[in-house]
Every structure is written in structure tokens, then in C-alpha cells.
Image (cartoon, rainbow, N blue to C red):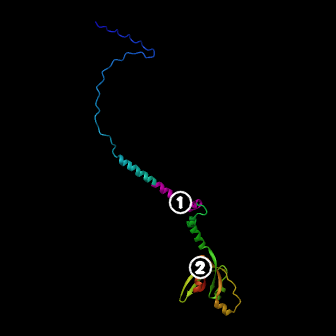
Amino acid sequence: MTHTPPPPPPASPSPLAPPVRDAPPVRDAPPPCPVPHFSPVRVRGGRQRLRRLLRHRRRAVAVGLAVTAATLVAAGPRDAERARPPGHPAAAATPSADAEQRRRAAAPVTAPVRIADAETVRMLHRGDRVDVVGADGSTSRVVAAGARVVEVPEPRESSAESASEAGALVVLSVPRATAARLAGAGASMRLAVTLC
């Protein structure tokens, strides 16, 4: 006769363990439904929208650059000149320097001119307006138009015959470029004056 050990005594509940509650009754759950297989969802025109967005962005950048360039052009070279240091090498090539050169070329200067007919020069007075005509053989041309007489110097003491052959000096106020033409014409032509 075999001896069976007695069953172990029931474990006493631990004071820290939560009390065991009865589980709610299990209701019948619906059987799981299989998920059908489908292809990935693709948005139509996605690449075209991206290209359109990039194109609009490029246009916005181009318009911004054009507006900036127009603003700089409207500001003119004066603002650029203020921004440059005094010894900057680009300062000599600016439009303001060209305008200064043109202003200096147009500024009047006094030019002594020897006129072939001394008697005509003696008729002139300060403030008169004259045209200086250069004659070379059979051709003649106006070298200076509307020149203002600044001074009529007195002739030196010499014989009347030699004075008339040498002509007479008259000081005219003309632009710088016209003074250079007068000097060149006086070396190769006989100059005469006509009152305007």
C-alpha cells in the first residue's frame, strides 16, 4: 500500500498583493476580419505641383533681383561715391568724374588771338561778340562762333606799316576746346573777325 503525501496547505494571501476579483464574464467577440490588400495611394500631379512651386520661387527671386537692381540704378552714382573710400581706384572712372571733365571742357577760358587785319581789331570793344573765321587759300571756315571780346590790347610802338602787316591781338573768352582750335588755326591760317 502506497503512501500519498498530504496536499500542501493553501497559501495565505500576501498583505501587499491586491485582492483577486472575479473576472467579468467573456462575451462572444466577432471573428477577426482580414484586411484586403490594396496598392499604395499616390497623389496625382505631385511632381507637377513641385515643379510649379519651384518655378514660382525662381520667378519671385528673379523679380526681387530686378527690383534691387532698379533701386540701385535709381539711387545713382552719388550714393556709391559716398560709400567708396577717398582713395578708391574706381573713383576716377565714375560718371561724376566724366561730368566734371565735360564741365571743365565747356568752362570759358581767355585766349589771345592774332587777327590779320589790325584795323578791324581797333573797331572792337570789350563785351562785343565776334565770329573768328580762318582762311587758307580759297577755303574758309568758322573756327569760333560767338566769342566774347575780353580785351583789346594797345599795339606796341612801331611803324604803322609793320603793325598792319603783323596784325593785332584780341583776347577772347571761349570754351577750352575752342581755344585749342583757335591756337591750331592761328598757326596755319589767316584769321579774321566778324561782329555778331
- Residue located beneath label 2 in the image: 180
Q: Amino acid at mark 2?
A: Ala
Q: Is residue 123 left or right of residue 93?
A: right
Residue 92 image point, x, y percent:
57, 67
Magenta range: 62-83
Question: Can you say whether 6 is above or below 27 in the image?
Answer: above
Of the image marks 1 and 2, the number of the one nearer the N terminus: 1
What residue is drawn where x is 66% and y is 92%?
162
Look at the numbered disc 2 and give the secondary structure of its residue: helix
* Residue 141 lies in the magenta-colored region: no
Quadrant in which the N terminus is drawn: top left
Residue at (52%, 57%) from the top-left corner? 71
Say the numbered circle drawn on residue 74: 1
Q: In the picture provided, is 79 more to the left or to the right than 4?
A: right
Residue at image position (36%, 46%) is 46
Residue at disc 1, secondary structure = helix
Mark 1 neighbour class, 10 Å CA radius: few under 14, some 14 to 19, many 20 or more:
few
